[in-house]
Amino acid sequence: MILVLDFGGQYNQLIARRVRENNVYCEVHTALDMEKIRALKPEGIILTGGPQSVYKEDSLLPPIEIFNLNVPILGICYGAQAMAKILGGEVNPASVSEYGKTEVEIVGASKLFANVEKKSVAWMSHTDRIFSAPEGFVVTASTKNCPIAAMEDGTKNFYAVQFHPEVVHTVEGMKIFSNFVDICGCKRDWKMSSFVVDTIAKLKKKIGGGKVLCALSGGVDSSVAAGLLSKAVGKNLTCVFVDHGLLRKNEAAEVEAVFKNFDLNFIKIDAGERFLNKLRGVIEPERKRKIIGEEFIRVFEEVSKKIGAVDYLVQGTIYPDVIESGLGKSAVIKSHHNVGGLPDFVDFKEIVEPLRLLFKDEVRQAGRELGLPENLVNRQPFPGPGLGIRIIGEVTAEKIKIVQDADAIYREEIFKAGIKNLSQYFAALTNMRSVGVMGDGRTYDYAIALRAVLTSDFMTAEAAQISWEVLNVVASRIVNEVKGVNRVLYDCTSKPPATIEFE
């Protein structure tokens, strides 16, 4: 096992994911005390990035004793600076900050950089940097504005990199993690099947004979969570599907048809009017998310009272949901209804989130291990707040119908064109109205925005380049078939700076 000590950076669970991609088990923990670190018996330790400055009095630093454990340690960004500070180096504000893609040059022999190109692009994001390395360290990489972009003490197996090898923009990042796994002497024998078996065992131990209610949306995340709980507690699990009126066209009927065939307790709640009334007049995105999140909880509480003595609420929360909602000292990007959108009071003994540390593709792997059907495992991602965050501004019944119809056309034409590589795609309704002309008459209607992205982990994403022929057909059909729309736009922004959803 490799232990990741978390100092509040945006990409910390992504580090664990890179280790797991090398078939080595990895856990992320906040900076622990030495007793807990020793109890975990890590083969190696990784110190993550974070928003702090190591020279400030309130900065969070790893326990100095970890450097006496005789295990390899890799510091990344803030983690590199923390290593330098603790071991006697110097860290100060950089005269020139580095953000984004930066050319890094390897300047010395290093086990960490074995078979890594001498010059390659890496992802930088820092305002501080290491000005002098601790005694025993040698510089192994540099950039134009950062002379110590990497350093190491090879005799003690201490390594530090100022850039982020975990993000996809660092071209040689996977080689670096593979090399660190080798330095740690790990066996590379961990697989997703291990996660499934271990998680089911932990759920059995935690829940025992208690009753469980699973918030089931029909998406891959909640479906895999339901699959894990079904294996763990059997008939003590009740799956509740809430139709909040913000689903895609015909989706409620489709979800019900799929899960009626499963051997589990399935309840469908029609709550469209209820959610619409709560959202009336609300414009601000975070408020919409929190209203939807709270109303979900209230519906689940009502159902649990009818069932009787439900102790646990299960949600299909995955790691990108957690990090965007704000984890530890990480910034809040947007509150996901099942994380940052939860109300202060929840009438359940505990909320159980068995997928909280996984990324989307890892969830899909877990689904396959559970034997879920492939069409469900590969289902298009759909946010819990649904079309509520694909409608800019106030949500109304008219707007819901507009975006449902436009989205159905978009998905139909993508299917007809045989495009299968898109990670996520959908239509959203902007709050912009503009002048158009139809049938020799003036119109003043809404603009639909189309979105399609390519991503492996949903932490970063690139806009997909769909052919003009397909987009032209989609745009033509939408303006001709969807009442209230006279303009169609295509969103070609990556994440970051945008997010995948509009709100």
Image: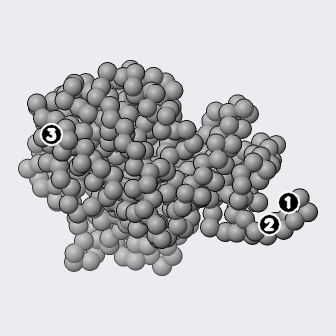
Which numbered disc, 3 or 2, marks the residue that appears first in the sequence? 3
Question: Is residue 39 at least partly visible in the picture?
Answer: yes
Which numbered disc, 1 or 3, marks the residue that appears first in the sequence? 3
Q: Where is mark 2, residue-wise?
A: 443
- Camera-nearest residue between 290 and 189: 290
Give the side of residue 221 with respect to residue 3, left or right.
Answer: right
Amino acid, disc 1? Met
The image position of residue 499, as x and y in percent, is 52, 58
Q: What distance separates the C-alpha of mark 1 from that of mark 2? A: 7 Å
Q: Where is mark 1, residue-wise?
A: 438
| Location of residue 8 by image quarter | bottom left
- Binning the other alpha carbons within 10 Å of mark 1 as few (below 14), some (14 to 19) or many (20 upward) gives few
Q: Secondary structure at mark 3?
A: loop
Residue at (19% x, 33% y) in the render: 203
Q: Where is mark 3, residue-wise?
A: 308
Asked if the residue under mark 2 is in contact with the one under mark 1, i.e. CB atoms within 8 Å, the reply is yes
